[in-house]
Amino acid sequence: MPLLVLVLFLFSPWAEARKVVFASDPYPPFIYEEKGEAKGTAIEALEKILDIPRKDIEVRIIPWKRALKAAEQGRVDIIGPMQIDHKKDYLLFTKKVFHSEEAVWTLASSQYLSQLDWKTTEELRNHNLGYVLGYEYAEPFGTYLKSPLAKKVEVQDVIQGMRKLLSGEISLFICNTQVLEFYAKNEGIPLKTFKRVGPPIIEEFGVFGISHKARLARDLEKINARIMKLPPAAKSGLN
C-alpha cells in the first residue's frame, strides 16, 4: 500500500479504533468467566466510565501478578478492581467505583457463634478461622492472620471455605461480603444460612489502575467525572 494511501486510511473513519485492554484475576462478582465469556460488575462499570461499548473492551482474565506486570509494561491499559497502592507508580488510580467489605462469617444455626460480637481479633483466637491462601486481607485481619496465636485454617478458594464452614471443619470464615453472596447464590445455598459476626471491615478496594503508558491515562479526569455520576450500589442480601 503506498505511503500516502496508508496515512489517509489510518486517519479515516474506516480505520478501526484499538480496543481497550482490561486485565484482572477472577474475583466474582467483579470479574469471572462463564461458558467461555468474561462477565462481571467490573466489565459493566468499565463500559460506563470509559463510555465505550462492550465490543471495544478486550478482557484478559489472568493471574494478578501477570496483570500488574502487563500494566507496568504497557501491554494492558487498565486493571482492577484493586486497592490504591502508591508504590505501584506505573499506575494512575481512578476514584472508587465499588463499595467492598470483608467480614467474619459463621452459620446462622450456631446459637453461640452467631451471637459472637467481637470487638478485637483476640476474641477470635479460640475458634478455627478459615481464610483463602494468597488473598490480601484488610486490617485488622491482615495482621491477625500473621500471628502464631491465631487458630487459622487455610482454604484454596471461597467455595472450599464455605463447604468447610457448612461441614463444621471451621467455625468462622473471613470473606468479602459480595464474593460470599455470589458463590452462595451460585451454589444454591440460601443466604440466610450464613450470618456475619462482629463489624464489617470496609476495604480500601474498588478502584481501577490505568497504565501510565496507556492512552487512557490522558482521560483520567473524564473517567473520574463519570464515576461520580454512577448510581449507588445496591445493598447486599446478606446481614
Image (cartoon, rainbow, N blue to C red):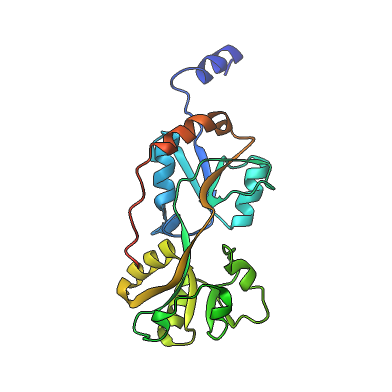
Q: Quadrant of the N terminus?
A: top right
- Name which residue lies at 42% across and 83% down: 113
- Tell me: 58 left or right of 83: left
Depth check: 49 or 225 in front?
225
Point out residue 218 in the picture as x, y percentages from the top left corner. 57, 28
Vertical position of residue 7 compared to residue 66: above or below: above
Q: Quadrant of the C terminus?
A: bottom left
Residue found at the very far top of the displayed protein: 4
Percent of width and height locating residue 104: 47, 72
Q: Nearer the viewer, residue 108 or 10?
A: 108
- When asked about the image quadrant of residue 180, the answer is bottom left
Can the viewer see residue 55 in this picture? no
Give percent across and percent down for residue 5.
Answer: 54, 14
Residue nearer the viewer, 155 or 234: 234
Furthest-front residue in view? 119
Instruction: Write the residue at 41% across / 34% down.
Output: 52
